[in-house]
Image (cartoon, grey):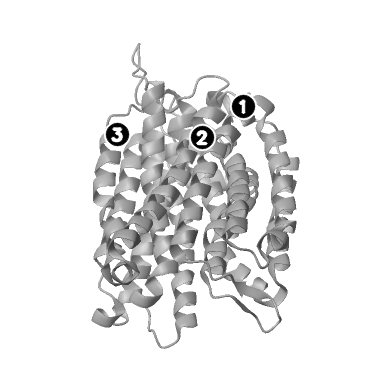
Amino acid sequence: MSRPASTLPATPPRNSPRQVAIASLVGTAIEFYDYYIYAAAAVLVFNNQFFPKADPSAAMLLSLSTLALAFLARPIGSALFGHFGDRIGRKRTLVASLLTMGVSTVAIGLLPGYDSIGLWAPVLLCIFRIGQGIGLGGEWGGAALVATENAPDGKRGWYGSFPQLGAPIGLFAANAAFFLVSYFLGAEAMVAWGWRIPFLLSVVLVGVGLYVRLNLHESLVFQKAEAAGKKLHAPVSAVLRLHGRAVLQGTLIMTTTYVLFYLMTAFVQVYSKSPAAVSAAGHPTGLGIPANTFTGILLIGAIVFGVCTSVGGVLADRYGRRHWLMGVTLAIMLFGFGMSTFLAGAGAWTVLLFIVVGLGLMGLTFGPMAALLPELFPTEVRYSGASLAYNFGAIVGASVPTLVALELNKGYGLWGVGLYLAANGVLTFGALWVLRETRNLDLAAVGA
């Protein structure tokens, strides 16, 4: 450990509740917007732009497989930005993570296609996608800590829901951008060049995010740890060595949240837009719903997702993290078992109901996570620990669910996909079962 280098001033600067809410929400909304426009483009256009067109099915699989690269890169971002977040503070590290994501996103928007530069197109696309993953890997933990370390007593769940709102806001904004581009330019122009517009708009959004974050003060909890000489030279190594159980618990707690979300936004999108057909095993593989119709459905789902995210944070403060999340996880498992009833032979209205229920459950479980995961770790390793748990959960629960679900649906139908969701729910429920309640913990005293 380093020696105490300084003492706190008599009245250390504090962030107002309004500053905390805006800074944690705006930053994550921008980061998730950047992240989700990639997911939307991977489904809609990247198979045509960056991969050989001789085999459309192979091109779509290759395009979707690039989604996984960011999830594999996110723990790298967690380790990199977590190290500096625990060493030099939350504020400066969050600025760096936002720039990493923004530069990668704009670069994708400027990238020539396969017809122009051949194999360099998918190679560079993968590199910039990894850059997005590294940026988001460092973003979430810092934003969660800005919210929770500045929260009043008894309101960490509510304050923690603000960075979580970045996900539904980013999802809404990303799909709205593609919807508007397609509506005003037409599907052909959107595929040819219009898809670049949402990526290039990231320049403006990142500028707004930087302005907000540069006006933040460092959290008092971190200032106290710094003044007490509790900073570690290698926080990532320390958290894995000394708090490995907490990292594992956090990872498993996040798993079902991620599986549910990417089934809702990626698998169901591919399934809904694919032509109505059946697999060799006799299971439906598509519904033939128009692309813009599904995008409209997803916009409605994103609003429900956002409302339920805030509700989840408030109710986790009222009933405790453990009991609330155990109840929601059971509901998600039941929802998985009902997937085939919802979607087999469904139309647009049934898909809308399915998306609304699924993303509603997603919000109820996602809202409390920015409070719960930081509560598992002491201040000197909190950025690293919360980030690693969150992003390891992404690898387990979100890196390949779309590809797995597509194959399960071909072989076993929607029942197999729902069982996959329920099986992940068992892992999450088990981790919550052995978790101690963290609602009333003093963050400054965790690990003391």
Tell me the quarter of the image containing the N terminus. top left
Residue placed most toward the observer, 142 or 67: 67
* Secondary element at image label 2: helix
* 417, above or below 228, in the image: below
At 36% from the left and 38% from the top, the residue drawn is: 26
Residue drawn at point x = 46 percent, y = 58 percent: 295
Nearer-N-terminus badge (1/2): 2
**C-alpha span from label 3 to label 2:** 18 Å
Earlier residue among tags 3 and 1: 3
Instruction: In the rendered view, tell whether residue 36 sits above or below residue 28.
Output: below
Asked whether residue 251 is in view, the answer is no
Say which amino acid is labelled 1.
Asp
Alpha-carbon span between mark 3 and mark 1? 27 Å
User: Given the image, on which type of amino acid does mark 2 rest?
Assistant: Ser
Asked if the residue under mark 2 is in contact with the one under mark 3, i.e. CB atoms within 8 Å, the reply is no
Residue depicted at x 38% and y 69%:
126
The residue that disc 3 covers is: 212
Using a 10 Å C-alpha cutoff, classify the residue at mark 2 as few (fewer than 14 neighbours), some (14 to 19) or many (20 or more): many
Viewer-proximal residue among 23 and 441: 23
Q: Nearer the viewer, residue 54 or 84?
A: 54
Please provide percent x and percent y for residue 89.
Answer: 37, 35
**Element under label 3?**
helix
Residue at the image point whose x is 31% and y is 45% from the top: 96
Q: Say what secondary structure mark 1 lies in.
A: helix
Q: Is residue 444 visible?
A: yes
Residue type at mark 3? Val
The residue beneath circle 2 is 161
Q: CA distance from mark 1 to mark 2?
A: 11 Å
Read off the residue under disc 1. Answer: 317
- Marks 3/1 in contact by CB < 8 Å: the verdict is no
